[in-house]
Every structure is written in structure tokens, then in C-alpha cells.
Image (cartoon, helix red, strand yellow):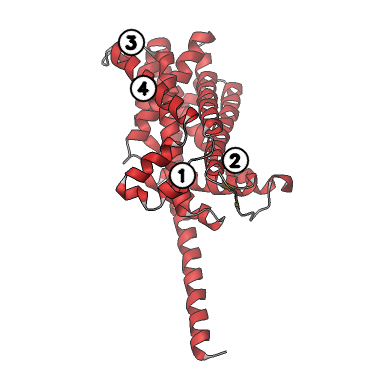
Amino acid sequence: MSADTGEQGAVRTRGAAVKVAVRWLLIAVAVFFLGRALYLQWPAVSDALAEIPLGAAVASVVAAALAVSISGQQQRSILAALGHRLPLRPWMRVFYLAQLGKYVPGTAWAYVAQMELGRKKGIDRASSVLAILLGAGLTVLLALVAGLLVLGAPSLSWLPVAAQVAVVVLAAAAVLVLAVRPGVVGAVTRRVPALASRLGEVFPAAGSLRPAIGWSAAAWGAYGVHLWLLAAPTGLTGADGLRLAVGGFAIAWVCGFLAVLVPAGVGVREAVLVGLLAGSIGSGPALAVAVLSRFLIIAAEVGLLALVPFLPSAVGGRSGAATVVEP
């Protein structure tokens, strides 16, 4: 072996070591901010727990875990439509690790983490970027459609009912187009100069987005049940309570999502939830429910990540790579 070959091997080894170190450093930073968020919220959470029965909190965290899992399946189904099929366990490891990035200031960290972790599983960056964009778009659109459940709510009186209806109708129309003609995504990306070089090639005709649309709708249902289980002991009961919980959580999430400089929309989502729920259960219980909801969703995400190594091998190997198929 020549000296040049040996030197090149040493450089590659050092480069790989640096990448591993940077990856673990980013995970450590994300865990730090996550722990900080939990620590800062605990005083309010402990007060909220005194008002909400333990059984309701346990049932709520189970519903939150289901909602997070469904959200992960939405992204996985979009990647399958793009031609990348990843076994369940490796995908869960990618998705739940990436979720830690939400708690680092700046919305993009979770997406960057998902893209880089996916690359390790054989998913090219262009496919990851498009899956993330489509996933975010579908999530927002379905959340706005869920807003139909709270049309005309007193807390939304600042926005004329006609405007509320228009938003819901436009969102529903966009979802319908994506369900019937998914190839429109490729047509659009090819016409945007910044995206045309790679993304238009990734999604020329596109596989069906209907599974992803179904997963998105199911996720909002599960998140709404999570919130309703917490709020029911404070008076948000029956079908009307469930309706308000589903629609209210979806609208509050969109507001938090649009606050791009706030980690995971902390504070914004809670403020909107309080405004939507206060008229039904009072501002004090509404604040307790909103804060506890955030805490339990974080607990669900951490718990799901911790469970990944214990999944049976039947759902995919620990380091399984994506299978590339024709969309």
C-alpha cells in the first residue's frame, strides 16, 4: 500500500469520526433543549396534574403517542410514493430522533436531522426534502380543513366567518387535487427554478398521496382525542367537546408551526388553545390543559424513541436501508 493511499484512508477515517462526533453533538444539543423545556414547564405541569385525574392523563399520553406514530407513517408513506420504502423500525429511529430537533431554536433543525438520518438509510436528500415539504403541506392543509369543526367560534370572531369558510374550502380543494392528481407536484416543482434541478426529477408523476392524506387526517383525530381526554374532566364533554378539541388543536398547531423562530411553537400553540377552550371550560382549566398537553406529547415522543430498540425484528432490522422502487 502506497503512502498516498494510506494518507487518504486516514483522512477518510478522520472525516467519518468527525461526522459521528458532530451527529452526537447535535443530538446532545437537542436533548439539552428538550430537557430545558421539560424543566421550565414542570411547575405549571405539576399544578395542572392536580386538576386532572391521573387516568385521564395516562389515556391522553397514549392518544398522543398514537398521533405521533401516525405522523411518522405519513412521512413514510410519502417516501414510498417517491420510490423509497424503509422498514418500520429503521424509519421510526430516523423519525423520532429527528423530532428532538424541534426543541432546538429554529424550526428547520428537525427537518435537517430527518434529511441527514434518512441519507444514512439510503434516501437521497432531494427525496427527503420533497417528502418533508409535502408532509408539512398536507399537515397544514388537513389542519385547516379540521378548522371546519370550530367555524364561528367566539374566539375566532376577529376573522369574518366568510373568511374562515374560504380558508377551509381552499384547503379542502387543495387536498382533493393532491388526492386525484398527485402528478401536479412534479409539474409545479419543474417550473420553480430553485427546485427544478432535482425535485422535479424525484416526483415526475408521483405515486399516490392518498395514504399520506389518510394518515394526516387520522393524526389530527388522534391529537384531538388526546386533548379531549385531558379537557373532559374540566367540562369539555360530549360530541361538542370532541369537535372543539379536534378543530382547536389543529388550528393551534398551525399557529405554532407558523411561528418559525419559536422551538416547536412553544407558547404560541398554548395561547391559541387557551383562547379556543376558555369559553367552554374557563381560562384557568384551559391553561392547565394546554400546558399539560405539550408536556404529554413530549413524553410520548421520548417514550416512542426509547421503545424503538425493543421492536421485534419482523418490522425491520436495526440498520435496514431503504428499498428503491418505481413510484
Residue found 27% across the figure and 16% down from its top:
159
Which amino acid type corresponds to the residue marked 4 in the rendered image? Leu
Measured along the vertical axis of the image, is residue 278 above or below residue 42? above
In space, the residues marked 1 and 3 are separated at their CA atoms by 45 Å
Residue under label 3: 154
Which amino acid type corresponds to the residue marked 2 in the rendered image? Leu
Residue under label 1: 204
First in sequence: mark 2 or mark 3? 3
> Which residue lies most toward the bottom here?
2
Q: Is residue 270 left or right of residue 318?
A: left
Q: Quadrant of residue 320?
A: bottom right
User: Horizontal and vertical percent for residue 302?
Assistant: 55, 42
Residue under label 2: 304
First in sequence: mark 1 or mark 4? 4
Which amino acid type corresponds to the residue marked 3 in the rendered image? Pro
Tell me the tag on residue 170. Answer: 4
In space, the residues marked 2 and 1 are separated at their CA atoms by 34 Å
Which amino acid type corresponds to the residue marked 1 in the rendered image? Pro
In space, the residues marked 2 and 3 are separated at their CA atoms by 37 Å
